[in-house]
Structure formats: structure tokens, C-alpha cells
Amino acid sequence: MLLDVMMPGMSGFEMAKRLKENEQTRHIPIIFLTAKDTENDTLLGFALGADDYVTKPFSVREVMARVKAVLGRGSLHQPLHKDGSLEYDALVVNAANKTACIDGDPIALTRTEYELLLLLLTHRGRVFSRQQLLDSVWPQDVIVTERTVDVNIARLRKKLGRYAACLVSRTGFGYSFEEVRGEK
């Protein structure tokens, strides 16, 4: 489903939220096509269940390529629970209050580490390139190199303890959150 954030009657964010809360429609892939291009808008779109977020201006060819990519991936997206949380075994991330914990114990994450974890956890199995992670997590007005992603992933792994192995490096491609044998 292609959604604009600024639709008449109901925002695209609200529609995505309703679709993901409904058992019959939660599997439908969502791509936002919108002029709302702030970091917060993008992160909210992903937190609500978007499979991709495309800001204007864009070409029809780009949109078609993104639709094919989303459909080719299948439904890898993990929707948030009604309380805004997402779980992987004893690892719980709460998008509503911006916290993460393991076995009920809070993990002290920076904003960047938290947003990386939320993005990767909500899209389990999907490999994000360093550039995609930079575009999704870091502010557009900040100049950072792709190696900044590596440093933040390394810090996040240290804080995730037994779940560190779930942050998988795909050499030449990027990072993903994957179930590791022996976990879960």
C-alpha cells in the first residue's frame, strides 16, 4: 500500500497504525510517499510499520524499484504491540517510551543506538546498508561517514549481551537483526 502522510480525513500515519493493529491487514506492506522528510517523520513511519519511506521529489522508476524490493522481501516487518513494544525473546524495545530492556533490566542506550536497534528489530532479517542506516537514523544536517555506523553497531553489541550475535554483519552489504541458533 502506498500512503501519503498528509491525506485528507485521516493521516497516513493513523491509517498505517490502524492497518497494523488489525489482524486481517497487518501483513500488508506499506510504503510512505510524502513531502514529510524530517528524521522524526521517517522514524515514526518505520515505527508504525512502514516497509519503506520515500520523500518527495522522487521518480516513478524509483518508486517502482522500491515496490519491487518490498514485495521481493516478503513480510519481514515485525509490528509493534498495542502498547508500543516489540519483543525478541527477553529483549524488549518500547517505541512509546523510548526504552529497551533485557530480562526486565533497562539497557542504557544513546538515542542513536536505540533508533538503530528499533529499526533493525522491526525489520528482522532485512539487511540495511550503512547508507540506509545513516539516512534512517542520523539527522540529515549532520555529516558523518559510513564507518560511524560500524562504531555505533559495535557499541550496541556490547550493550546487548547475549543478543549481540543477533546484530549480523553482511560483508559488503550492511547489517541486520537475525535470530541466532540457540537463541529464542
Image (cartoon, grey):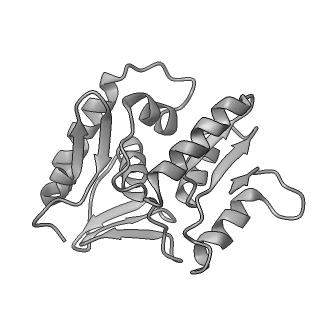
Residue 108 drawn above or below residue 65: below
Q: Give left or right: position of 43 versus 13.
A: left
Quadrant occupied by the N terminus:
bottom right
User: In terms of depth relative to the viewer, which is nearer, 68 or 159?
Assistant: 68
Residue 81 image offset from top left, x and y in percent: 48, 75
Quarter of the rendering containing residue 9: bottom right
User: In terms of depth relative to the viewer, which is nearer, 22 or 90?
Assistant: 22
Disc tally is 0
In percent of the image, x 21 and y 38: which residue is there? 154
Residue 2 image offset from top left, x and y in percent: 71, 52
In percent of the image, x 53 and y 32: which residue is there? 139
In percent of the image, x 72 and y 41: which residue is there? 36
Residue 150 image offset from top left, x and y in percent: 27, 31
Q: Give left or right: position of 15 versus 167.
A: right
Quarter of the rendering containing residue 146: top left
Residue lying at the far bottom in this picture: please name it: 23
User: In terms of depth relative to the viewer, which is nearer, 166 or 144?
Assistant: 166
Residue 183 drawn above or below residue 30: below
Residue 102 image offset from top left, x and y in percent: 23, 67
- Confirm whether residue 162 shows in the render: yes
Residue 50 drawn above or below residue 89: above
In percent of the image, x 46 and y 34: which residue is there? 132
Q: Give left or right: position of 151 versus 38.
A: left
Residue lying at the far right in this picture: please name it: 8
